[in-house]
Amino acid sequence: MLFTARSIWTMVHGMVLGGGALLALAAVLYALWLLRPSSEAEIPERYAGSVATLTVLIAAALWITVLAGTYIVFPPYRAPPPEGLVDLAYYPRSLLLGNPETAWLHAFAMETKEHVPFIAAMLSTAAAFVSVRYRSGLLGHPQIRGAVMTLTAISFALVAYVAVLGVFVNKVAPLE
Amino acid sequence: MSAAGGATPTNGAAMAATLAAGLGALAIGLFVILNEAGIYGAPSLYGPAGGVSGRTTFAVAVWLIAWGALHWRWKERDVDAGRVVTACLVLVGVGLLLTFPPMWDVF
């Protein structure tokens, strides 16, 4: 078999859901900037609906990403190898910690990835809630639009940060 | 109808969600640092995932409770958006700092 179930879950977690959320976060940020209100042109309400829909999809994708990461991908990553096993290829945490040059990928990168994505998911959920609740007022209310942009921008930065860390970990100790 | 038109809604519900997200971020940071300092380790709720399952579940619970309470108080009101967003930024910053592994050596 070309890909194991663990490997497929890792790809779904990082590339499909996490990567998709990152692209959608960028799209929402751009849309909110592009659709800033002006006195000369009115913004069609359907645009606010589209932004709201996208924020809901982002929040859903991020929650599935963090839950799949924590409860499906992380357990095999941290599983201890049988005593005396020399080839640690199937035990990424032990593989990383076994080499001083790669230990930081667990001690820093994976430890960060365990917690920070939950913050991004909370921020995106708040942005989605506000976007849906204020649907018609989202784009025309500077305070509310500003709050959604702030939440989305931080979430984007955090998701991008942990995505890079995930790439580093997976390049050195992929979950096969 | 324009999205920019219509009556201006109160901003309380939006600000409650914003501040609660900041509190959730702080909660994550606090559960992490308390665990790293050996003061309080949230129990593992799913053995194969270890302590992270407890830390994150408890932090999510704090976030949802804070959100519910703030929403209940603010949903019909206008609150100072600038202060709330600033508070959210500070809370997220502190939460992130506490989850930053090099910080754990300080405690």
Image (tube, coloured by chain):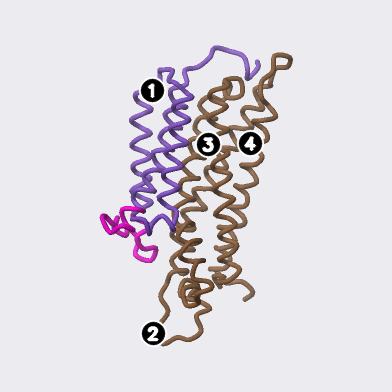
Chain colours: A brown, B purple
**Number of the label disc, if any, that sits on residue B74:** 1
Residue B54 point in image, percent of width and height: 33, 55
Mark 2 falls on what kind of element? loop
* Residue at the limit of the structure toward the left, as seen here: B39
* Residue B47 falls inside the magenta stretch: yes
Q: Is residue A84 above or below residue B38?
A: below
How many numbered dots are placed on residues in this image?
4
Going from N to C along the chain, the mark reached first, 4 or 2, is 4
The earlier-in-sequence mark between 2 and 3 is 2
Q: Is residue A39 above or below residue B94?
A: above
Whether the residues at callouts 1 and 2 have beta carbons within 8 Å, the answer is: no
Task: Find the distance from the CA under tag 2 to the CA under tag 3.
Answer: 46 Å
Q: Secondary structure at mark 3?
A: helix
| Stretch in magenta | B33-54
In this view, the mark in front (1 or 3): 3
Q: Quadrant of the N terminus of chain A?
A: bottom right
Residue drawn where x is 59% and y is 50% of the image: A160
Query: Would residue A176 be found to the left or right of residue B58 on screen?
Result: right
Foreground pick, A51 / A156: A156
Q: Mark 4 highlights which residue?
A: A29
Q: Measured along the vertical axis of the image, is residue B13 above or below residue A64?
A: above
Q: Alpha-carbon neighbours of circle 3 within 10 Å: few (<14), some, or many (≥20)?
A: many
Tell me the residue that label 2 is attached to.
A83
Position in image of residue B28 (x %, y %): 39, 48
